[in-house]
Amino acid sequence: MALPGYMKWLPDAALGKLARIEFLAHGAVDGFIAGRHKSARKGASAEFAEHRAYVAGDDPRTLDWRLAARRQRLYVKQYVDETNLRATIVLDASGSMGYRGRAAAGGLSKLEYGQYVAASLAYLLVNQQDAVGFASYDTAVRDFVPAKAEPSQVRCILERLDALKPGGETDMAGVLHEIAERIPRRSVVFVVSDFFADAKELLRALHHLRFRRHEVIAIQVCDHDELTFPFERACRFEDLETRQFIDVDARALRKDYLARLGAHFAELSRGCGEMRVTHERVDTSRPFHEALADILVRYRRAAGGGR
Amino acid sequence: MSFFAPWMLLGLAAAAAPVILHILRRRTADRVPWGAWMFLADSLRRRRRRLVLEDVVLLVLRTLVLVLAAIAFARPFLPELHFFGGAGMDKDVVLVVDASASMKLSDPSGRTAFDRAIEEARSLVEDSPKGTAFGIVVGEGTPVILTPSPISAKREVLELLDSLEPGDDAMDAPRSLAAAGEVLVGGANPAKEVVVLGDGQAYGWRCGDEAEWKRVERIFARFPRRPPVVWRTFERPGDVRNAAIAAVRPSRRVIGTDRPAAFSVTVVNAGSVPFSPGDVVMRVDGAEAARAPVGQILPGLARTFEFSHAFAKPGRHEVVTSLDAADDIASDSTVSNAIDVVDALDALLVNGRPSARGFDRPTAFLEAALRPELKGTNAVFLVKPRTVRAVELENPAVFSGVEAVALCDVPFLSPRAVQNLSKWVGGGGGLVVVPGERAQASFYTNELFAAAWTNWNHSLSDVAFEGAPVSGRAEFDESALRKGVDVAARFSDGAPAVLSAAFGKGRTVVTALPFDLKWTTFPARPLFVPFAHELVYSVAATNSVSAAVDTRWRSREGELKPLTQDELDTLAVSVDLGFARSLDDLMAAVVGRSFGVEIWRPFAVLALVLLLAEMLLCRRIDAERGGHVPSLPRAALRAVALLSLLWMLAHVSWTHDVTRSLHRRVAVFADRSLSMQRADAGAGEDGVQATRYAAATNIAARLEERLLGRYDVEPFEFGDRTTDFSAALELALARIPSEELAGAVFVTDGRDTSDAGPSAAARRFARLGAKVSSVVVGNPTNRTDAAVEALSVVENVFLGDKVRPVARIRADGLKGRRVVVKLMEGEETLDRRELDVDSDAWTKDVRFVHDPGGKGVRGYRVAIEPPEGDLEPRNDEWPFEVSVSDDRTNVLVADRRPRWEFRYLRNLFFARDKSVHLQYVLAEPDKLAGGAPANTAPADATRPFGEAEAGALPKTRDDWRKFDVIVLGDLGRDVLTDEVCEDIRYCVEERGALLVLTAGERHMPYDYAAGPLSGLLPLALTNESGAVSARWVAAKTPFALTPSGRGHPATAVSSSPSENERVWGSLPPAHGRVEGVAAKPGAEVLLFAGDSTALAAPLLTVRGAGRGKVAFFSTDETWLLRYRHGDTYHHRFWGNVLRWGAGEKLRDGNQRARVGTDSLRCLPGETVKLMARFSDKDFMPVAGAKAKAEVKLPDGSLRTVDLVERPGANGIYEAEFDATEKEGGYEATVLAPAVEELLGDEWPRPLATRFAVDRGTAPVEYARPAADDAAPKAMARLTGGSVFAAGDDLSELDDAFGAGRSEIVERVDDAVWDHPAGLVLLALALIAVWTLRKRRGLA
């Protein structure tokens, strides 16, 4: 029996690779059911979290009597609560994501690359009982699927992904502000984009997500050509979003272009670092499952290896 | 700024390449849909200005490199600037080294002028700056070009100079300069100069030869600046000793083995000092035959020696006459002649008075004189007289083998005898008519020899002939002599003693002396014997001197006259001539003279610099953009471009030898004349019946195959309408360069039907060493055939006159039968004759007379009823048209005395041609005592036709202007007063008349240096000081055509240029001429005295004056054109003059408006000239009329052609109409509304003329069906060729024309540094580099 068309976004090779990986969020997340992730709420788990001053109404069973004896004040003993994850995958479907470089693995455009990454993430998370939501945007939010932990969520997301086409000019900062508002609870937000927008605006939008206490993982998808600017001849460059063009000797601009690109990346990395947003850049010349696996492995290590 | 090689500026087109590449590059840019737009746009915003700037600078640099290189290759120069001490420009200098015989003259040190010329030429070459290229032309009669183009390798030039040697000819200066000009054309340098190294001798510069100098002028005009000619003249040695043989003339036309032949040898002292040249020696066939000491001759004088030699054997003998003169110029001391000697000359003496007593017979003394019986001697006599009776002349066979006939006191001849005699004389025989008491003057006057003796005079006293007293003689009415009759000898009282006239190809002599003893003792005198012999020789048909070498050119080489100032002034018009009197002068003129500054070098350097700058900029941009990748192809192309510019700057040239292979060519002519359409047995190969043309083309094709192995073959066909060998030969001469012409072969049926005959053109072949052979196809025997063989008729008759055709009827093999001859118009028989044929080779002239009635073109034909068994039906009729017109030319001839010129002109115009209305006036007419008073009526064009004599010139201007042609002789100011001259000036300048002035000894033109007539004269009569320099000189004046005259319609007495030249050249010299005159600007000299230059002694000078024309004859003996030719050429020449000056006769219309064509009949596709003439009510030509002609074609359709006013003609409008292929009658109607309005009722309605277009039967071609090898044999004899029959083995022709191939080695100097290939290479290399860069994405 033939598989549905949307299943193309979950190739066997990727599934094989990702099946051995487990995603654990760095910080606490709000979940529905008890799971492997720390809950934002203190709960009944065996792992001590912190002490806080007793306030009226607290369960007297949570009082730490030993501490009260030492400090002559009442403290409530709190434990880390374990919960399942809520995650939202935000995919940039703007025009610039339609670029398809000559060196891209499998000849994928940046959007297709992002679609594979999003599909893989959705599958991974749902597979470990986490709730996954999905949002895509270009000039505005095009799709928004609230997070659910149901197995059918993967199909839902895949269908949305399958229907996705590169759009027009993006206002990435504005759209991220909106998405930040629309995600109801603290969760992990995967932003898959090329982040070719004004760095300051972009960082402000990411800050908005962080302000809402979301854990943000920014996956920057860049084509190899965009990173190296390998053009040797006179070229007519056409803006994928506005359809403007310029005729120019590519070599005459390469140096300056790469410098500007580097500066942009540097500012983005610095800003993400400051607000503890995980910023990962992937080159479409690498197979997406390898790049995603690396990202997840690095993330897990950064998260302390999980339990 | 001018350019030496402006065509190189085409290279500027390459300068568009960078722009095109730039545009193409934009169009072929890779399209990249780009995501990271914001970074790209930012970068571009920052760098855009710089990128644009780099692009623009590169574009400009590249364009400039190509522009500057193209300009540099075009060799710009500034002609008016003189930088660097006058040595700004490289030069091409052609050294013309005079190698004439006079250059062998040596100075006291023993060095010849030629040695000095070579030395100075060497100095010039050695001391000239680098970059000067030299060419060498050896100045001889035919200049030799040693270097096709100037060469800059000095060593080569010096070698060539050292190889030169002087020749024996004279230098032809204009042709040498023309050759120098041709050499300069091949030169690479912009500055051009010609150096002539010679001895300053005027002869050879041909100052009067305007056409040659015009040619030089045209060649020199090809250059941006006319090349100056520097003439380095070497002083002649003070004393030149030179004797030359000016002429060797045999005393008579027939030279036999019977007696010694006398030769008159003229030796001249052509040097500058009295000189005794030793002996003059005549050698016959290598053996000395005669010798005489010359003795001393003063400079400029001549001495004549009489030699005699008895030729022992008949045949051709070589006679070499030389001087044992150790003089300075040896080449003019020897002359060679070839003499044909005959061993017998048959003479027929016709006895008109039989008598039993020997010396009562009128032939007795003549016979005895011609073949005396000298007992006891072994005397041999050439003339073999045979006496016959008059009746025997009725048998044509009696003329067989006879060279001369003497009619001695023959009373009259029967018509048959007259006919036979006429035919025989017309075919080349000689006739002597001797009077006697029985000879009937009326018979000789009317039937045989018009205007012969008139009466007898028995009792003369004190009259002698050549010293012998004469007691009785016949007398001639000299004033009534037939045209063409010359007085060959006179009695002591001036009365004619011997008259001579040409008759056809033969000659007739009439004596006034009887050859018996009844009235005179002359036959008994010793003088009689030589007289009788000379008489017979003079008419005999043979001509011994067949090949005499013309010595005039060489003998004049000895005259060391320098050019006069007048001649120099004339030359200055054509060439920029300067003189160098010393080597220093020469060096200053050649090395020190600058023609401006050549500025290609700065352009080339700038191009090189900019190219380097472009390379550096590219490299920098590449490095900056990180795209610099070394590329071998690009580097190699760059190197090519750089080397191209460096090559140019290095100024490299290549001197080398070029071997030119010369392929000699043979012209093969296939005759396609109408007679070749005849099919007769024997025409084809193996005797098969075929048309002659088919056989001829077959043979010609085989011949071409045969000859192709050895020669290049030029196939021709000739004979569109007539068989004209002369035209064919001249075509070959025009088409094939003379050095390549090996010969010609005709495949023909042989009979020449042209007017000119092939001799003159064949002689030109002979001079080139080219042989003319022929293969004669067709049956050479006549069979049963009757034909109209020839027709003589005046095509244009005046209204009221009768048409008088004379048809020659021939009948072969029809003896005893009857031939019927008819004159027909359309199908109507106008006249009919029945003629009995009494021999197998029978001919008869039949005269018809018919009154054509009104004006128009009438179509007649003379036809014979074909007898049974007639071989050729196409020669049974001869169609002809006659135009009946009332166009009359009014001619006034006026002179002081009845000079010969006047008499012949009067006779020419008077009543001979009724279209000429003559009035003649003599200021001092002959007055006869007791005679009728002279007619004193003034000349008036309205007098009745025939009343030609007038007593005075026209009275009023109105009377004057009615004349179209005014001929004025030696009239003084008493007759041609200022008022009369003013009227004449008016007639010429305003009315458009032709004025002909004939010089005389007393008045014309000396009296007219001032006054109204002086402005009309084409000659200047005064010298610089204003004194009249014109004077009459009694000097022998040979006629010679100037180059202008060769092509002028007035002097064209034959349609063949060679024949025309021959006719003028063979005239006996006139006895006087005007000298001290010079042609005015705008005048054209057509004839000049051959012993001088055209400028010094013009004989016929013409010019336009207002609307009319003026011709001036500097001699009064144009009647010499009648010498030996009757009036044929005299009449033709004056007809030409009238047509040229007064316009053609136009047959239709009226006095005011006329129309006509140049011919009545033409072939389909030929061009007919339509002409119309309009004059207003005052006979003034109408100018500016917008006229056209509507031509109605045979099918009724119309074609319109515009009539254009002929420049310089008095009111003649003309158009050329190309006849269509449609045969039939054409009618042209003239439409000129403005003239019609002007003339009102006098406009003829309609003004129309008719002409016919058809292929014609060209009856002359069919007249004799038999093949005839006479003309081919004549050509073969003159050129050394052969004549073959169709079936002969032609293998003899395989190598009959000498070597088929030869090689010429020429040294050439190729200026490779500015070769167009350099520019092409540069442009291609650069464009390729830039293209490769663009493809690599580089700037």
Image (cartoon, coloured by chain):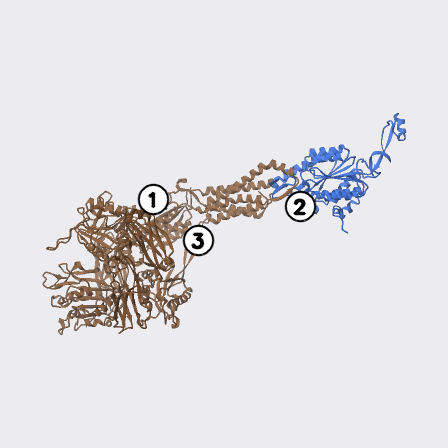
Chain colours: A blue, B brown
Q: Nearer the viewer, residue B784 or B604?
A: B784
At numbered mark 1, what does the secondary structure look like: helix, strand or loop? Answer: helix
Q: x, y percentage for residue A275?
A: 74, 33
B57 lies left or right of B201: right
- Distance from label 3 to label 1 (Cα)? 32 Å
Mark 3 belongs to which subunit? B
Amino acid under disc 1: Asp
Q: x, y percentage for residue B923?
A: 16, 50
Residue B1020 visible in image? no
At numbered mark 2, what does the secondary structure look like: helix, strand or loop? Answer: loop
Amino acid under disc 2: Arg
B461 lies left or right of A203: left
Residue located beneath label 2 in the image: A102
Mark 2 belongs to which subunit? A
Q: x, y percentage for residue B143?
A: 35, 54
Counting residues from the start of the chain, the first of labels 3 and 1 encountered is 1
User: Do tags 3 and 2 sit on the same chain?
Assistant: no
User: Do tags 2 and 1 sit on the same chain?
Assistant: no
B100 lies left or right of A128: left
Pointer 2 with pointer 1, Cβ within 8 A: no
- Distance from label 3 to label 2 (Cα)? 62 Å
At numbered mark 3, what does the secondary structure look like: helix, strand or loop? Answer: strand
- Distance from label 2 to label 1 (Cα)? 83 Å
Residue located beneath label 3 in the image: B656
Closer to viewer: mark 3 or mark 2: 2
Label 2: few (<14), some (14–19) or many (≥20) C-alpha neighbours in 10 Å = some
Q: Nearer the viewer, residue B362 or B421?
A: B421
A235 lies left or right of A207: left
Residue located beneath label 1 in the image: B585
